[in-house]
Image (spheres, grey):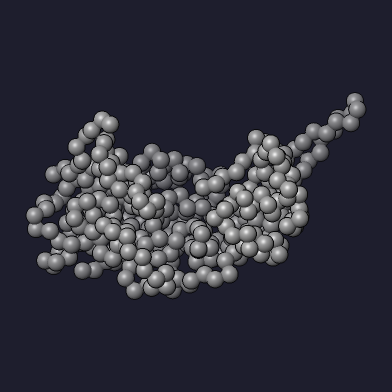
Amino acid sequence: MVLHRPFTLAHNNLYAPHDLHRSNRQSFCFGNQSRMNTLEEYTPPMRDGVTASKVFLTQFSTTPNCLFEFLCDHFPHIYAEEWQQRFDDHLIFDMNGQILTTQSPYIENTHIYYYRFLQHEIHVPLQEEILFENDDLMVVDKPHFLTMSPTGQYVQETLLVRLKKITNNPDLTPIHRLDRETAGVVLFSKRVETRGVYQQMFAERQVNKTYHAIAPYQTDLNFPCSVRLRMEKGEPFYTMRVTEGLPNSHTDIELIEHDGLWAKYRLKPSTGKQHQLRVHLSWLNLPIQNDPFYPTVSHKNEADFSSPLQLLAKHIEFIDPILKQKLCFCSEQVLTL
């Protein structure tokens, strides 16, 4: 059975035109004499699992009075007091590693670095587990409630920073992502040199992913079934909604077991839209147990870890582009009725 909508026709990244230190070799000419100086570009060290963020200082028709003014104006979601604190804590550097202050001038066509730390961050009392790793790849079993990477209100309590602190590897990067609410298997790249081939593997849909979910049992639905829907950004902005038009998301759904009230479903997405599985089950009138977004948004206390979303990235399978062999990984977590 195929379920689908009928077809109808129907972050502030700042960059400069160029980076003066993009190359580590520059030519200097003095009169008729030319010589090559080798300059090593400054790379900020990782601090407590946090890698420095890089901001390019573009050329404006009217140059900002100072760096502090620029940062406040161009990152309005960050309070001026927070930028002030970062300067006071010596967390902002120029591209040569020199500490900057609130009085430092805005220098066009250069870049700066800054570290993000939060004074108050809620501890997530759940632990990740490393399932596998080699020179290029790390496979992790993520717990519920743990955000993948640093965001507005989470830095230390994110999976990426936790793993960087354990491994002391500043190049560690997630190859794909899971929602904060979702638990299960996720892959990380360990080396910049091989990161691209793993990212391409996902972009070309060469990865088979299987999820488990607990949702209501409906006697009038027949399984297995396929759901194809067109999904677009919803309101609030962090949600997704189903719209008319050409489907851009696809999930195969199977019934594993049920107790007459709740059921466990096996979900196999062939696309990777944000919140895809949550939206697809909700569209079937089968909202996932403890889902705070679908079918309606219901905010809960950030420190409440009592009712995790019953969605688990259970299994992942792919041909490793470097090893040239099939790899399969399974979460050790289990969802029960």
Query: Residue 13, percent across and down?
Result: 56, 45
The residue lying furthest to the top in this view is 32
Above or below for 214 versus 19 = below
For the point 83% across and 34% down, the residue is 28
Quarter that holds the N terminus: top left
Query: Residue 64, percent across and down?
Result: 70, 46
Counting labels gives 0
Above or below for 115 versus 3 = below
Residue 198, located in which quarter of the rendered image?
top left
Left or right for 175, reference 191: left
Left or right for 264, reference 161: left
**Residue closest to the eye, 33 or 96:** 96
Quarter that holds the C terminus: bottom left
For the point 73% across and 48% down, the residue is 65
Residue 145, located in which quarter of the rendered image?
bottom left
Left or right for 140, reference 280: right
**Residue closest to the eye, 297 or 15:** 297
For the point 63% across and 53% down, the residue is 72
Above or below for 322 versus 123 = above
**Residue closest to the eye, 1 or 246:** 246
The residue lying furthest to the left in this view is 220
Q: Is residue 328 visible?
A: no
Left or right for 180, reference 50: left
Q: Is residue 178 visible?
A: yes
Query: Residue 188, percent across and down?
Result: 47, 54
For the point 40% across and 60% down, the residue is 180
Query: Residue 21, percent across and down?
Result: 71, 41
